[in-house]
Amino acid sequence: MPGEAVYSLLQPRCKLPVYTERYRTVASLQFLRFRQLDMIRLLAETGSVRAAAQAMHITPPALSKSLREVEAIVGKSLFERTARGLLITVAGRDFVRRARVLLEQMEELRDCGNARGPARPTLRIGTAPFVSWRIMPRVLRRLAEQADPPRIQIIEGRIIPLADQLVNGELDAILTLFTPEALQVLGQHDLTLDQLHAERMLIVAGPGHPLAGRRVGWAELATQDWILPPATYTQRLLVQRACLEAGLLPPEPVIETISIPAMLRMAMAGLGLAITFESTVDDAISEGQLSQVMTKAELPAVPIGLASRRLRAESLAMNALRAAARALVGQTSVKSGPAPRLPRSTKGKSTRRNAVKRRQARKRSY
């Protein structure tokens, strides 16, 4: 077995009786060095022995030898060797994720020993473009008012790649929409989820649109021209669900765009209806550039929250970020731990209540 060779090699240094393969692996991990962890991280990022060796100022043969040593200690292959370079394995991806956490903590220990005092910590925050545009500036303004605020790096993107970056240690937190789709992704990992705020969704139109300022049902809304994002986006999904719950076919947009500013400009120009987050249109509505189109049943609000790795969740910088976000939305208590659910619509509740009444009526008739 591969573990037998490793065990016989390390036995004189361990001086411990080893009875199981798992115990051998745990005993041998003590010989890993932080420089080797950094090497594995570089190999995962570059996919090249030569590039990683150059970054570490060593020769490629020396790096290859060190990689074989790490794989022997771990007892698993971390990379597949191909003609085009290295491909990380499933075991390698898990190893790199944990190695990043250890390297990050080592950097913090170095900062503690700095003669000039600890350096300002850096928070790498992933966020949706809408959150970065409308919510993040106010959160960061609050954060800057606190003592010793951290440095901030903001990475915009969709929830699935951001969640992967968070789990792999490339991000410290994600401030994003807690939609059912997002929670399904985030709930697969050991993360801390804090619901901070619920953002109302509004349907808007240009001031000259026939439905501007009116309260209408989805039977009429489904026949209108719409300006919507692609099918996987929150706004489009809300329109689709509302129409399907009303027994209607969802409308196909006459204009499709992922840009909220562009969507709102087109709605102002009278090109169709748009659905968006309340904070993105409150100024335009108050200035008369857009008008709200009200629905008979209010659209569900979308929760916004902070997702972070558990090892980083209680750091001083993360607590400062969480406090700034809570202060912004004016909340004193926040849901934490289990994934929060989106509010259910009034229509859904009444439908379920009516179904229960029908079952009870059938039982009485029997």
Image (cartoon, grey):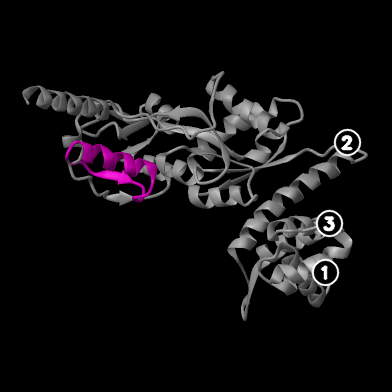
- Looking at the image, residue 196 lies above or below residue 14: above
Distance (Cα) linking label 1 and label 2: 43 Å
Relative placement, left or right, of 37 versus 304 is: right
| Residue at 30% across, 35% down | 206
Relative placement, left or right, of 129 versus 41 is: left
Q: Residues within 10 Å of mark 3 (few under 14, many from 20)?
A: few
Asked whether the residues under the numbered discs 1 and 3 touch, taking CB atoms below 8 Å apart as contact, a structural biologist would say: no
Q: Say whether disc 1 or disc 3 marks the residue closer to the N-terminus.
A: 1
Q: Say whether disc 2 or disc 3 marks the residue closer to the N-terminus.
A: 3
Amino acid type, callout 2 = Gly
Q: Quadrant of the N terminus?
A: bottom right
**Residue 15: horizontal and vertical position, in percent?**
87, 58
**Residue 228: horizontal and vertical position, in percent?**
33, 45
**Residue 72: horizontal and vertical position, in percent?**
74, 68
Residue topped by disc 1: 9
Secondary-structure class at tag 3: loop
Viewer-nearest of discs 1 and 2: 1
Q: Which mark is residue 16?
A: 3
| Residue at 84% across, 71% down | 58
Q: Residues within 10 Å of mark 2 (few under 14, many from 20)?
A: few
Amino acid type, callout 3 = Leu
Q: Which mark is residue 291?
A: none
Q: Say whether disc 1 or disc 2 marks the residue closer to the N-terminus.
A: 1
**Residue 121: horizontal and vertical position, in percent?**
75, 39
Residue topped by disc 2: 117
Magenta span includes 226: yes
- The quarter of the picture where residue 214 lies is top left
Q: Quadrant of the C terminus?
A: top left
Amino acid type, callout 1 = Leu
The magenta segment: 223-247
